[in-house]
Amino acid sequence: MKNILQSAFLLLIFQLMGSIGAQAQLINFEETWQAFLKDPLTASVSELPKPPKSSVGDYAKYHLMYANSSFCADELIDAESYLKELKSMDKSQYDKYPGFSQRLADLEGKMKAYYKVDVLWKRHLQKFDVSRGELEAAEEGRKVCEKGTLAKYYQMMSMAYYCEGNEVEALNQFENKAMRIVDKTSLQAADVEGLPGEIKRSKAHFKVLGQLNKAWKTYMDSDVSPGFEPEVPLYTCYTIPNMKAYMLRAMVDVCKNGSEMLAKIKELEAENTHDIPADLAEKIGWLEAEVKKYNGNLAVLNKAWGQFTSSGKVDPSLKYMGEYCEKDAQIKAYTMAGTLDYCNIGEEMLGKIAEVQKEYNPTLDATTKAKIKALEKLVKEDAARQAKLEEAWAEFVPQDTLNSIDFAFEYCDKEAQIRAYIMDGRVNACYKGEQRLADIDKLMASAKPSLQADTKAKWEDLKVVVAKYRGDIAALDKLWASFIQNNDTIYEEFTVEPYYCDKITQVKSWCLVGNVNTCEQGQEYMDKIDSYTKTYKLKYDQELSCRITRLRQQIWDCRYWELVRQAQKETHEERERFGPESAEMMRLDLNNDKLPCNTEVLYEPLGKIGVRYVIQTFLCQGTDLAKMGDPEYYKKIATWVDTEVLSKYCEANMRCKKDFYIYLEGHTDGHPFSFHRYKKSLGVPKGTEFTHFVGKGEKEAADTIVKKTERELSFDLKSNMELGIARAWTVREQLQFMKVPITIGAYEHPSKERGAEYRRVDVELNITNLLLDFYEKRLAELIEESGIGEKPKDCKG
């Protein structure tokens, strides 16, 4: 008796302790919930235990608080997960709690604002065209607790103000708002897509603007441009700073830079939407008038000058004489004309040169001065020109280098002429070495001059240098042969020279390097090949032409698969938007007062373009197999599939319905089942194939076996397995009208899993190709937008 009393007393104590502990947890949970209702930013939920799902109210509150906490901590995936679980509950289960709906609406509004700002942010990263009006329309983004959204919002607002021409406010938005969030809060910029690059871009941009404004003020105060070398990033929405930079460069040297900078300014003016400041407009007008004065073609002059300085000759078709703003160019024109016909007009041209120098005192480079001197010497005497050449020779001999080639190439003394060829060929060995050796051979054959030892030695040195360039080409040709032999592959490591004299060899070298890491660097070398081909009007044999084509194909493949991945990503995003939304719509439609039991509709992604809807029809204790065969219930499912799913994404050919199949799974709970007889035959034929699942518990996977029924299931059932088959078969009979393949299964839950939640039929709608048309259409759009066009056609060779 005494032992019995002691046992009863101890039991009472343990019950009281458990009750007190549970009550303390409830108090702590409720205090946190009340704090959350007052201020969701300050309520601490980190230590709250997760309530069981059976505690509906606390379960809903827990998920709302943790969804809010995760969102404010920049953990969007967790927030969505908590919110999704909350949304899976019946709204009536939590709407009754004071303040719950308001806090839920507040969180959903903030998350909507986050996504709205994120859409603008993605466009901003590509186009920089988000307006202040759009941002003000998304002003809720400034009120969210998620700091990444705030940083993106003010970063875009900075750019919007800049596009309006308000540089001061643009800088304020960046430094005092966006950067304060980055620098003064826990936000990690690297966690926000595109933000590190934007910060780097803005810092560099505002730094350049500060330098530009300082330089422009100096110019306005002194009327002397200090120049401006830094590049001002060009944003078409506001180009006034770029115009100022071009004007500063033009005014450093109007003759040298005026035409080019004016053209750039005019190009910007054509699309400018802002009023041009009066000081800038005045300077543009002055520059236009100054540029119009002169008729000399500087491009033709430079080409002629290049020929003249390299060979001493000028193509007669190059009409380089004219009036030049650039007085050094004017002197070049006079110098060339006088030199090429020094016997007749040499002295006249020297006089004109003297007049220009006296009036304008232009700065001349060493080559121009040398050519004037050469003309003077031509006019005076050949001996003086030869003396100049000997000076150059003395400079050249020690190290085979010259500061400049400023001597003529025709002399009475043919050894002097050969020395001129040697020096020119050595300094410009790649593109003139071969020619100068030929010139020397020709002169030696015709004049047979006697050469001094140092001349012979330098002649031999020139031959060695030219042979070395030939060797570089031979090495590349060998590498190329290996590349062709191994089906456009090189297995060993290799290096190429940065420059080859032979242009075809140069193209081959780029083609080889372009085949290494093609997706990363192929386009870079393809651009070089294209530029080289256009510049030098190159023609290629079939072998090289095909390799260039195949490199283009590889580059195209890289870009194409990048677009494929983007299309897949957008298709998945569309599926994740539509799938849960449509599943919820169907769930609401299937649950009504006429149905005795609850129905859940779950969404799952299927493959890359498909969806799976699992319609869980729960069976109440009193529901028999006849209730499961309500035709109207299943017509609703079919109608929903046609009108709310297939019609959203299927084109007229209904390709998306291909491989659509249904799997039905009858679940039985852990209650033992030995026998039941029915008045009407169930009609399950012997040999019917089904999937049998035998559940083991929460942490263990069910045993799965594909079987066939060993007898006809007609009027009686003898096991949970047969009951599960019968449930699935009954639904199958109602869905046959959908004319899609249907398979069945039976799931036996273990004995500890009992109750209505385990008595159900799962209707799996597997629409394997639902978003096929969406994906292909989006891929086609991306390909069109990218401009990659059709894949280059293959070639043989």
Image (cartoon, rainbow, N blue to C red):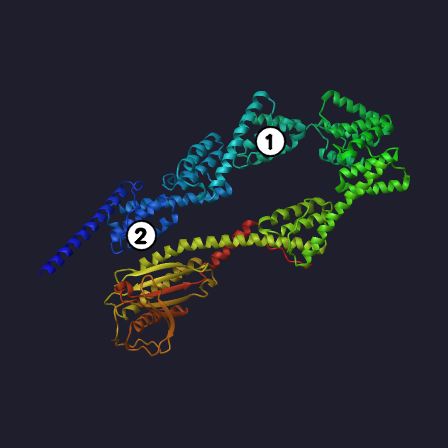
Few, some or many residues within 10 Å of mark 1 (<14, 14–19, 20+): few
507 on left or right of 628:
right
Q: Mark 2 or mark 1, which is nearer the start of the sequence?
A: 2
Q: Residue at x 83, y 39 (%)?
A: 457
Position in image of residue 215 (x %, y %): 56, 26
Please name the residue that numbered disc 2 is placed on. Answer: 86
Position in image of residue 102 (x %, y %): 29, 45
Q: Is residue 252 visible to us here?
A: yes
Secondary structure under tag 2 reads helix
| Disc on res. 311 | none
Quarter of the image for the C terminus: give it.
bottom right
> Based on the displayed image, in which of its 4 quarters is residue 349 positioned?
top right
Which residue lies most toward the left here? 1
Position in image of residue 499 (x %, y %): 69, 44
Please name the residue that numbered disc 1 is placed on. Answer: 229
- Foreground of the two, 705 or 547: 705
